[in-house]
Image (spheres, helix red, strand yellow):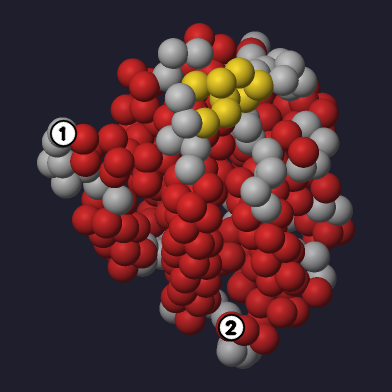
Amino acid sequence: MASKKPGRVVREYNDEALAINARHVHFDWSGVPLEYIPGEAYATHFWNVMHLVLPEGERAMADVFSQALPYIDDERLKEEVIGFVGQEATHAASHEGFRNYLRAHGVDVGVVLRRIEFAVEKIFGDHGITGPARKAWLSERLGVYAAAEHFTAVIGEWLLDNEAFDRAGIDPTMLDLLRWHGAEELEHRNVAFDAYQYVDGGYARRARTALIACSGLALLWFSTASHLYRNDATVQRRRPWPFEYIRAAHHGLVPGVSFLFSQMYFYLRPGFHPSTMGDISKAVRYLAVSPAAQAAHA
């Protein structure tokens, strides 16, 4: 069911009625190996990108959606956006904890941090824009982050479904971080999209910002992973990173390129809504047994 607002359709919340709340989790990194996927240096660095890139990115996203709140009259959506902002802030802090662990063990993260800070501040920052242009720029950033959230949600479901990690013997603390984060991304998968639709809702902007988000994320993710892999002095037999990526994808340790392109196709369909993707009960089930999530309630 939908109700009309001037110039757009606003979704009513009839199907997924989850309350979105931040869980104040804590992860103890002491003793976690730097190569937490045993024997898989590139796959480890692929997921290390989360720890290096997401803290700034998710804080910037939380700030943008906080700025959108005055434009949202729907109390249910406003409540969800507030919960979403809280979860994103917790994600940022959790990944930053392992980033600090990497830095303390001699991993040079300076180049990567300068890249992401440039992206979120120089490219997607406020820029002091005022007047009507301020809302247009806010809508543009909401569109970019809504598309990015679609990818994090589907990758979150991928992490919950992934059995290759268990077979590979990934460190259990890191596995819980990845799956807890993935579960919360799946849990709040509708919120960023619904907020964008409410504040703007234009398909042309949605398609354009999706292409910006997809290409930007891919460039940042693969360049960061290859940088970390190239500068890892512990790698004994270094092969070109594209070969390592294909091998890791073949073994189910990272998502394949076809997975990423298919998700862009789904997102660009005019009638798309995140609620049509995947099974949100997977998130609920994992959050019920996640060691970190359960400890947060103790």
Asked whether the viewer can see residue 209, the reply is: yes
Mark closer to the chain start, 1 or 2: 1
Q: Where's the N terminus, which quadrant?
A: top right
Q: Where's the C terminus, which quadrant?
A: top right
Q: Quick one: SS at disc 1?
A: loop
* 84 relative to 201, above or below: above
In the image, 5: left or right of 166?
Answer: left
The residue under the point 50% across, 9% down is 75
Judging by the rendered image, the residue that carries numbered circle 1 is 131
In the image, 41: left or right of 91?
Answer: right
User: Which three-letter amino acid code belongs to the residue tagged 2?
Assistant: Trp
Judging by the rendered image, the residue that carries numbered circle 2 is 241
User: Which three-letter amino acid code belongs to the residue tagged 1?
Assistant: Gly
Instruction: List x then y, in percent, for residue 149.
Output: 56, 44
Instruction: Give 288 or 63, whichever is nearer the viewer.
Output: 63
The residue under the point 22% across, 56% down is 122
Instruction: List x then y, in percent, for residue 271.
Output: 69, 43
Q: How many marks?
A: 2
Nearer to us of marks 1 and 2 is: 1
Q: Quadrant of residue 107?
A: bottom left
The residue under the point 63% across, 32% down is 190
